[in-house]
Image: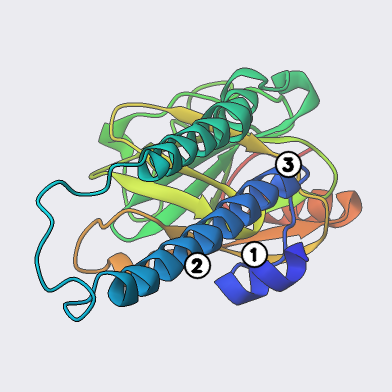
Amino acid sequence: MLAIINKFLGMPENAAAHGFQVDHMLEFCHWFMLLLFLGWSAFFVVTLFKFNRWKNPKASYHGVKNKVSTHLEISVVLIEAVLLLGFALPLWADRVDEFPDEKEAIVVHAIGEQFGWNYVYPGQDGIFGKRDEALISSDNPVGLDRNDEFAKDDILAKTEMHLPVNQKAIIRISSKDVIHNFAVKAMRSAQDAIPGIEVPMWFTPIRTGEFEIVCGQLCGTGHYSMKGWLMVEESEDYQSWLKETALRSGAVWE
C-alpha cells in the first residue's frame, strides 16, 4: 500500500531505515484528508437539497439547533491532535534527539553555495581540520587550510556525496552565502543550510543506488540547477572512492 501511495504522490522509493515512519504518517494524513473531503462533500450536497429555496421559501434566522456540527468540528480537532502528538512530534523528537555517536557513524560536512554543494570528509585520522574563509578559491571552495595538521587528509568533493550502505550517516549542513536546504527525498530527510550555523541531520541508507539531492529553499536565480547526487554503495566501493577522491583533491592518503 505504501509503495502505491508513494508512486501516486510522486515520492521515490524509501531508502532510509527511518523512512517507513515518515511514509506511514503521510499515508495516515492522506487517508484522513480523503475522509474529510468525502464527508464535507457529502454534507455540502445534502445541504443543497435540504435547504434549497423550494423547500425553504422563507429563510430561518435561528439556524441549526442541534450539536452535530459542533461534535464534528471537535472530532476533527481531536484527530489532528492525535496526528501531531502521536505521530509527528515523536518522529521529530527521534530524529533530533536520538543522534548516533559520531564514532559509530560516517560524518560529512555539506556546505551549500549558489548554486551547488560541497562535501568535506575528515580523512583517515577521522578529524576535521581548520577552514579559513580567506583561503576560499575555485580550487578550494570551502577554504581548507592544508597547513593545519588535521586538514592535510581532509577530502573535498563536489556534486556527489558518497556513503556506505547500512551505516549511520551524520550530515553537518551549513552555507557560504544565503539560506539553502539540503533535501534527499529518498532518505526522507531535509535540513536548512544557514550561513554561520552548522545544523546536523542523520539517516541510515538501507539500499544502494543514486539518489537526487536538491535545494529545498528558494535561493536565487539558479535555484533550479542546485542539484547533486547521493551515491550509496557497498563499503569496499566507498573506501575506493574515498582514496581516489582524496588523491584527486590533494589530500594526504597513506
Residue 248 in view here: no
Horizontal placement of 20 versus 234: left or right? left
Q: Nearer the viewer, mark 3 or mark 1?
A: 3
Q: Earlier in the sequence, mark 2 or mark 1?
A: 2
Q: Residue 159 in the image: state x and y as whole percent.
A: 51, 61
Residue 249 vertical placement versus 100 (above, below): below
Residue type pointed to by label 3: His
Task: Report the residue marked by disc 3.
Answer: 18
- Tell me which label, 3 or 1, sits earlier in the chain: 3
Q: Nearer the viewer, residue 84 or 196?
A: 84
95 and 235: which one is in front? 95
Q: Which residue is mark 1?
A: 211
Tell me the kind of residue under disc 2.
Leu
Residue beneath the point at 24% across and 56% down: 219
The one of 147 and 80 positioned closer to us in this rendering: 80
Q: Residue at x 76, y 48 (%)?
A: 205
Q: Residues within 10 Å of mark 1 (few under 14, many from 20)?
A: some
Displayed quadrant of residue 251: top right
**Three-letter amino acid code at disc 1?**
Phe
Mark 2 burial class by Cα count in 10 Å: few <14, some 14-19, many 20+: few
Q: How far from the left and from the top, in percent, is residue 187?
A: 65, 52
Q: CA distance from mark 2 to mark 1?
A: 36 Å
Above or below residue 251? Residue 3 is below
**As displayed, is residue 223 above or below residue 171?**
below
Q: Which residue lies at the image location 41% right of the left edge and 69% below the top edge? A: 41
